[in-house]
Structures are given as C-alpha cells and as structure tokens.
C-alpha cells in the first residue's frame, strides 16, 4: 500500500500510515470492550464445599448450625432444593446431611473437585472483571457473593438473594467418568468443562436478573429476550469467544454463522416468528442435540442464536441505545423492527 505514496516526504508517509492504522483499529474496535480499571470491586468468593466436606467424620449438631448461620440464605436453598433433604426443622435433617457428605461417591467427587479447582483464583479474576463491567453499566446494583458447592450432579448454577452459586461438580470436564455413568447425552456433557464455567454461570445469573416480562410470549419475544441476555454477556465478557457465550461448541457456532441466511429464511418462510404454539417454542428454544427440520450439524436452541443476531443488529443500527436501556426495553417488536435484521 505504500507504493502509492513512495514519492512523498517521510513525514507524509508517517502521517498517512498513522491515519491508516487508526482507521483500521477504529473499524475493528468493540464498543463493549471498555476500560473498567477504575471500577472498585472486591468480589467475595466462599467455598461452601470445603466447609461441608473438609472433615471426614460426621458433623455435630453445633458444627452444622455454625455452617448454616455462615451461609444463609444459601444453606437453606442448598438443602431444600439442590440436594433435596429439606430444612433443619426436619427431625432427621442432620442425619440426612451427614449421609450426603459422607457418601463414598460424593466424597470421590469432592476429591476430584479439589484437584480440578485447587486454584480458583483465575475464575475469580474473570468473574471480578465481568462484575466490574456490570457495575459500570448498573452502578447502583449489588454484586452477588460467589458461593461454590458440590450439588450431587443436580444444579450447575444457583441464584438467590445476594448470592450466585456454582456447582463445581458440573464442570469437571466433558469426559468425566460420572457424566457417562449418569447417562448424560454428549451435547450436554461437552459443555460441562471448566472453559465454560464463567460464561455459563454469568448466563444463568443474568437470566434471573432480567426475567421475561411478557406473560405469554410468542416465539419472536422469546428469541429476542434470550438475545438480550446473551448480549448482556457481550457486555460483561467482551473478549470471550462467541461460541462460549451461547454455550455452543465452536463447530456449532460456525454452523450457525455459515447458515444465518438459511436460518432466517426458514423462520420467515414458515411464518414462525409470532407463533405461540408451545411445541414450536420448545423446538427452537429448548435444549436438544440438533434442531428438527434443519440440516445435519445444526445445534439445538437455534432461536437463541437468531435472537442474539437480531439484538446485535438492533444495537448496531441504534448506537444511541445504551446497554441498560436495552435490558429495560420490553417492546420486542420495536427491537425487531428497528434492527432491520437481514442477514
């Protein structure tokens, strides 16, 4: 490219080169990749699994009471919903809790978790950076305490008042032996690895922070709502791979990228956008190894991908709209119309 300016002065060459470099960097700049170094945040991380399992013998009633007090309200949610043994008002509660924590299989899982996540600081650093972005956009909102736990392969993510729980036993690697023994399908277990931990946890948390406001949404509203959730991930972890944000393998994401026109035309040709038929909504929004009616290689949840594409187009076409304004926008038809989406 310098041949066209080879006869100009050195200063001119340098000046033009700087302009070209600036132009190229401006074109590729991600508006969501912002500097959050000024945002003050100390993210609290508590390892509930260590409190519960570090003692091999049975816990006394007093020891259980101390743990319960230190981890409320998570403790009640853990026993009532995650491992489903009820709460402390049950007469056999302490027996049931000790039976869970001394079970040989569960203790093996605890040992594997301790090995896999011996150093949780890299994940804490990623989560801290993500929540700094969150505080940048929502400065008055509270940031949850992070609580890690072992769920008995029940729940990867738990959210409650002021806490975000991470079931570490659900991120032990796609080839972890227990996943196959439990009969988990490959399309689910492939996402159960540490590389998906941060995006999955944030996606689950955002979904509870920004719930669907429409009582009986149609497919378009479901898709765009989910698109907003994933776009919020764009804002929190702007440098993460897109495939991980949507919980796809790279191959699945690439399939969607290479077939985005066909995906859009399929929905348009079959007049699917405004359907409220539950079976159709589940078909395009629910977990599945692939999408029925689409060619081989298509992933499930293809409505999530399309909704995300529409939201990205909306934000690109309307740069004056802020991330908080997007998340507060409940007129999904407005987002679709103003996106002018056309792949």
Image (cartoon, helix red, strand yellow):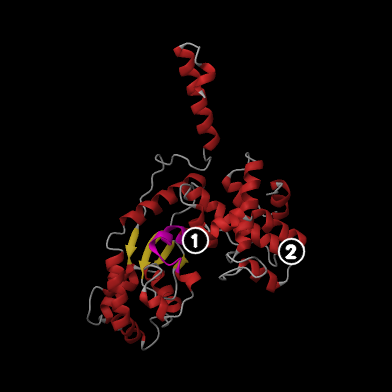
| Residue at the disc numbered 2 | 272
Separation of marks 2 and 1 at Cα, in angstroms: 26 Å
Q: Disc 2 or 1, which lies upstream in sequence? A: 1
Q: Is residue 250 left or right of residue 291?
A: left
Determine whether the residue tagged by mark 2 lies in a helix, strand or loop. Answer: loop
Q: Is residue 9 magenta?
A: no
| Residue shown at the point (48%, 57%) measured from the top left | 244
Residue 120 higher or lower than 293, as above or below? above
- The quadrant holding residue 151 is bottom left
Q: Is residue 101 left or right of residue 76?
A: left
Residue on which the image places disc 1: 249
Name the disc covering residue 339, or none. none
Q: Is 39 left or right of 108, judged from the image as shown?
A: right
Q: Residue at x 38, y 48 (%)?
A: 41
Quarter of image, res 215: bottom right
Could you say which is closer to the camera, residue 32 or residue 25? 25
The residues colored magenta run 190-201
Q: Residue at x 65, y 70 (%)?
A: 292
Residue 264 image offset from top left, x and y in percent: 69, 56
Are the residues at dot 2 and dot 1 in contact (C-beta closer than 8 Å)? no
Q: Nearer the viewer, mark 2 or mark 1?
A: 1
């Amino acid at each position: 490219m310098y041949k066209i300016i080879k006869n100009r002065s050195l200063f001119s060459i340098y000046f033009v080169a700087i302009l070209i470099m600036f132009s190229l960097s401006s074109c590729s700049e991600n508006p969501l990749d912002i500097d959050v170094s000024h945002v003050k945040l100390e993210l609290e991380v508590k390892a509930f699994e260590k409190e519960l399992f570090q003692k091999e013998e049975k816990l006394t009633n007093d020891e259980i009471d101390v743990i319960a007090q230190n981890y409320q309200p998570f403790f009640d949610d853990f026993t009532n919903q995650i491992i489903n043994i009820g709460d402390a008002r049950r007469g056999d509660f302490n027996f049931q809790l000790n039976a869970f924590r001394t079970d040989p299989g569960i203790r093996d899982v605890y040992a594997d978790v301790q090995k896999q996540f011996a150093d949780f600081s890299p994940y804490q650093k990623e989560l801290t950076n993500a929540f700094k972005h969150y505080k940048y956009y929502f400065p008055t909102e509270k940031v949850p305490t992070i609580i890690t736990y072992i769920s008995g392969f029940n729940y990867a993510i738990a959210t409650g008042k002021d806490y975000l729980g991470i079931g570490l036993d659900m991120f032990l690697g796609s080839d972890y032996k227990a996943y196959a023994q439990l009969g988990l399908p490959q399309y689910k277990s492939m996402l159960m690895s540490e590389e998906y931990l941060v995006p999955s946890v944030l996606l689950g948390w955002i979904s509870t922070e920004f719930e669907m406001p429409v009582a009986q949404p149609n497919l378009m509203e479901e898709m765009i709502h989910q698109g907003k959730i994933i776009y919020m991930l764009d804002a929190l972890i702007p440098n993460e791979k897109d495939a991980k944000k949507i919980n796809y393998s790279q191959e699945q994401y690439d399939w969607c990228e290479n077939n985005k026109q066909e995906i859009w035309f399929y929905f348009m040709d079959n007049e699917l956008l405004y359907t409220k038929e539950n079976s159709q909504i589940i078909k395009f929004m629910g977990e599945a190894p692939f999408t029925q009616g689409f060619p081989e290689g298509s992933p499930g949840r293809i409505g999530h991908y399309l909704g995300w594409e529409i939201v990205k187009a909306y934000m690109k076409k309307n740069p004056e709209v802020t991330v908080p304004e997007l998340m507060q926008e409940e007129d999904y038809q407005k987002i679709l119309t103003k996106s002018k989406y056309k792949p």
